[in-house]
Image (tube, helix red, strand yellow):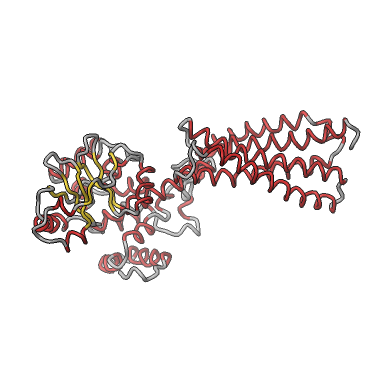
Amino acid sequence: MNPGVQIDHTDRIGEIKVLLEAHDEEGLLRLLGTLHASDIGRALAGRAGLAGRAGLAGRAGLAGLDEEQAVEVFKRLSPELASEVLLEIDERLRKSLISSITSEELIEVVQELETDDATDIISELPVEDAKQVLEGIEEKDSIALQKLLVYPEDTAGGKMQAELVSVAESATVEEGIEEVRRKGREMENLSSVFVVDAGGRLTGVVQLNKLIIAEPRSRMKEIAEADPVKVTADLDQEEVAKIFQKYDLIALPVVDADGRLVGRITIDDVVDVIEEEIFEDFYKMAGLNLEERVLDAPARSIWMRLPWLLINLATAFLAASVVRVFQGTIEKLVILAVLMPIVAGMGGNAATQTITVVVRGLALGELSLNNARWFIIKEMLVGLANGLMTGVVATVAAYLLGANILVGLLLFLGMTANLVIAGLSGAFIPIILKWFKVDPAISATVFVTTCTDIGGFLSFLGLATLFMRAGIL
């Protein structure tokens, strides 16, 4: 298939449905042969994930195949194409499709996968099924997969693959090229050759283009890049992604605690990690469960969102208790009740801006405890400047809407104070959480918003109370 051609997935899904209903197996196989694995995955993932859940499968607008049709299509795919499709769909649909095929068919599919992808699939299987697959594939592949299954999924070891080309440092370039020819047929994304000593410890890396143009009788040690960038198998996947970004790598060797080469991570796996980490931060900042998906049944979404909403409800009552303290002030000047949400809302918006910058800075390594003090002061100054400017605009707007000029002054002072609070809490709290090894993304909707709500109400209503007692209002 030409990758430059834009696929209309709705039309393709319609064609697949028509061919299934007509039992036109030859036409279906011909159509599937023109599609990329990701396009087939999109077709399978439509309504399949909703089949039988709360009656949603039949509703218009949820384009896609139902679960029975998805299984029927999947069973007609070749082992090679089926293995690629499994990597393009979510975990729940993947389990459903895998359960629809025999153990023998699953073994054929797993045999087509690279070791890192095969590890992901096998790790999701029940223990007995995983054991059966490992016993059914080739012995060398089984041994490699069992070694990879030991590592946690979110570490370098969990993301690496066993397929690589390693050559002894004493070997000639000619021997190195021959090794590439021998192993390269079974590998994808081959860009470099790793050089090891007699004990299997990584000593260098040779880029493929450099290997090809080197003098055939030169030693690999002579042309290798000594002391290459490498990671240990227990390093967190987020740190691995940072290393790829910092050094513009295509592949990265993974070593054990003794420096022995155990695998490699390729850029395609890191792209998945970056996407995963980005959405993980977005989900956490919104108080969402990482397992929730757009096509989940309502009951599942309710169950996943409710706990976080209850936590937010508790913090909302905390902010409301502050308002209650100033109930008498509000009763004397009702317009305060109209304006105080503006102060709190602006503080929340400003805090979200700060948190977003902080979380990104921490993720990229731009912000650390060493420069945290400067950043916190900077954000306070930014909050002060923005508070002064938006406060002036708010004061003018309130006056034009009929508010007393002194009430406008209260709004100006309250908004300025709360935006300073937003800058301080939005910068300080995520850094403190990071220091305590807690993910800073979770601070957005709980700690900081609570600070700006309470700070906004205290500053605005507190100043109003002081003005009244002083006889100014």
Estimate the x, y position of residue 313 in percent, counting from the top left. Answer: 62, 34
Residue at 69%, 44% in the rendered image: 384
Give the quarter of the image for residue 156: top left
Residue at 86%, 47% in the rendered image: 403
Estimate the x, y position of residue 139 in percent, counting from the top left. Answer: 12, 43
Residue at 35%, 44% in the rendered image: 240
Residue 28 at least partly seen = yes
Q: Is residue 188 above or below residue 33?
A: above
Residue at 57%, 36% in the rendered image: 428
Q: Is residue 3 above or below residue 327?
A: below
Is 273 on the left or on the right of 421, as rendered?
left
Q: Is residue 247 above or below residue 448?
A: below
Estimate the x, y position of residue 285 in percent, counting from the top left. Answer: 53, 42
Nearest the eye: 312 or 53: 312
Is 76 on the left or on the right of 353, as rendered?
left
Nearest the eye: 16 or 434: 434
Give the quarter of the image for residue 128: top left
| Residue furthest front as drawn | 222
Residue 133 at least partly seen = no
Number of on-image labels: 0
Question: Where the N terminus falls, by quadrant?
Answer: bottom left
Estimate the x, y position of residue 208 in percent, counting from the top left. Answer: 21, 59
Question: Where the C terminus falls, by quadrant?
Answer: top right
